[in-house]
Amino acid sequence: MELLKQKIIEQGVVVSDQVLLLDAILNEQVDPELTMEMGKAFAAIFKEEGITRVVTVESSGIAVAFATAYELGVPMVFARRKKTLLADPDSYVERVPSFTKGIVTDLLLSRKFLKADDRVLFIDDIIANGDAAKGLIKIIERSGASLSGVGIVVEKCFQQGAKTLREQGIRVESLAKIASLEGGTVHFAE
Ligand code: 5GP
């Protein structure tokens, strides 16, 4: 998506060979025009899939998941990230490592908002090792719902998350693919 690539070049900050700071458009400040365009793009990609719910993880996935759900005319549900001490009978819980925080957190998703007859589109901001996605996919499986696809704003191709999901037969579509961040510069994959 050209508008996204342009904003990444203008406003993204390469922190290291592994990490790209996107706080100006995704993680702290939200660019509404870009976000609505991304929602339209994901809705167009997945429009034939009969999606009934869009699922994401708080907090950075929420804006783009909302825009996508709005375009598809379906509800958006988000998993919360917490450190849980007690099992929560009302929620599905999956423990995952957090790439940016360097700690383990629990993803909690309310059982009320994910049903066995749902066709789910999982949307997230960035995929690195894929731990957040894998945790959420386990939750979707446990609910009995079917996963129709995964939409990612920024795929870091030099980390294994998206590749591993595709190898499992999951449809993963990214709006921008980054081949490397070497030399302090964003190199797009295509
Ligand atoms: P994963 O679980 O795929 O390893 O990491 C995904 C999560 O970590 C994303 O939801 C994203 O918020 C965060 N993350 C991973 N890599 C980056 C990065 O390079 N920059 C930023 N800003 N967040 C990242």
Image (cartoon, rainbow, N blue to C red):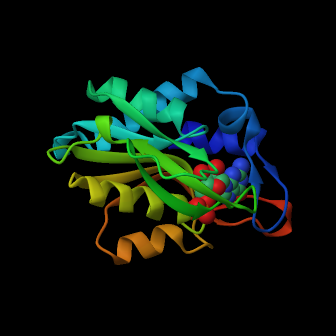
- Quadrant assignment, res 55: top left
Residue 116 on image: x %, y %? 17, 48
Numbered disc total: 0
Q: Is residue 172 left or right of residue 52?
A: right
Q: Is residue 148 left or right of residue 24?
A: left
Q: Residue furthest front?
A: 86
**What residue appears at the point 65 percent right and 27 percent down from the top-left corner?**
30
Q: Is residue 138 left or right of residue 128?
A: left
Residue 110 on image: x %, y %? 39, 39
> Can you say whether 25 is above or below 120 in the image?
above
Q: Report if residue 153 is visible in the image.
A: no
> Can you say whether 93 is above or below 162 in the image?
above
**What residue appears at the point 33 percent right and 26 percent down from the top-left corner?**
71
**What residue appears at the point 37 percent right and 31 percent down from the top-left corner?**
76
- Looking at this view, is 33 or 104 the one in front? 104
Residue 33 on image: x %, y %? 56, 22
Q: Report if residue 87 is visible in the image.
A: yes
| Quadrant of the rendered image holding ligand 1 | bottom right
> Can you say whether 162 is above or below 101 in the image?
below
Residue 188 on image: x %, y %? 62, 60
> Can you say whether 73 is above or below 13 in the image?
above
**What residue appears at the point 26 percent right and 52 percent down from the top-left corner?**
143
